[in-house]
Amino acid sequence: MPKKKKKIEARLSPIHGNGVFATGLIKKGERVVRYKGKLRTHAEVDEEYGDDDEDGHTFLFTLNDDYVVDANVGGNIARWINHSCQPNCESEIEEDAKDRRHKDKVFIQALREIKPGEELTYNYGITLDEPHTARLKKLWACKCGSKKCTGTMLQPKR
Ligand SMILES: C[S@@+](CC[C@H](N)C(=O)[O-])C[C@H]1O[C@@H](n2cnc3c(N)ncnc32)[C@H](O)[C@@H]1O
Ligand SMILES: [Zn+2]
């Protein structure tokens, strides 16, 4: 079967660094891309990156309680998708039918129709273990530019 052509490209973004933009019409509910990278345990990631998140930049995606997808290694275009407080995509975890947690996958899926030229975004849903102090909220400052921007990528703790 011929491979489906990707309807996205990575290029400079007004939000931050590189972003991902639609090059074709993306339908509501469409699975746009899988977030790929090396599968690591939380302990491995903590050991390797430690306090590296002190600059608010990350290519890590928490897959489940056991694993993190580390897009620093073997990452694909999905690692350039920026966060927004009013996103047009969402992340969706596809859990393995046999509950093998290392087989879980994460996909980025359209929340609405996305027109060519629009930047793709999703809410990273970042919460830190420590209290979300004003300093940390600033470190994780959000520049999504949407009307609903909360000013930080950190989400309220439940
Ligand atoms: C997965 S990377 C996205 C690609 C990123 N633009 C780049 O060029 O490396 C995630 C990082 O991008 C930055 N970022 C993403 N969305 C942002 C936003 N809405 N406001 C500010 N920085 C953002 C943050 O540093 C975040 O940790
Ligand atoms: Zn925002």
Image: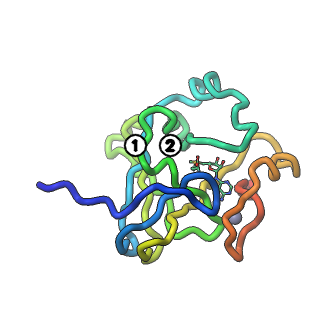
Above or below for 9 versus 112: above
Residue name at image x 31 percent, y 59 percent: 6
Residue drawn at (72%, 59%) of the image: 142
Determine whether the residue tagged by mark 1 lies in a helix, strand or loop: loop
Q: On the image, which quarter does residue 65 sit in?
A: top right
Q: Nearer the viewer, residue 8 or 158?
A: 8
Which residue is at the far left?
Answer: 1
> How would you rate the neighbour count of disc 1 (Cα within 10 Å): few for under 14, some for 14-19, many for 20 or more?
some
| Circle 2 residue | 63
Q: Nearer the viewer, residue 130 or 65?
A: 130
**Earlier along the polypeptide chain: callout 2 or callout 1?**
2
Please name the amino acid that badge 1 sits on.
Answer: Asp
The quadrant in which residue 143 appears is bottom right
Q: Is residue 158 visible?
A: no
Q: Amino acid at mark 2?
A: Leu
Residue 76 in the image: x percent, y percent?
Answer: 41, 44
Residue 112 horizontal/vertical position (percent): 46, 76
> Label 2 CB, ligand 1: below 8 Å?
no
Q: Secondary structure at mark 2?
A: loop
Cβ atoms at labels 2 and 1 below 8 Å apart: yes
Residue lying furthest front in this view?
Answer: 12
Name the residue that disc number 1 marks: 104
Residue drawn at the location 74% of the way across and 54% of the way down: 157
Residue 74 visible from this viewpoint? yes
Horizontally, is 139 left or right of 12 in the view?
Answer: right
Residue 98 drawn at (x, y percent): 32, 41
Point 82% across, 52% down: residue: 138
Quarter of the image with the N terminus is bottom left
- Distance from the alpha carbon under mark 2 to that under mark 1: 7 Å
- Horizontal arrangement in the rendering, residue 32 relative to residue 69 (left or right): left
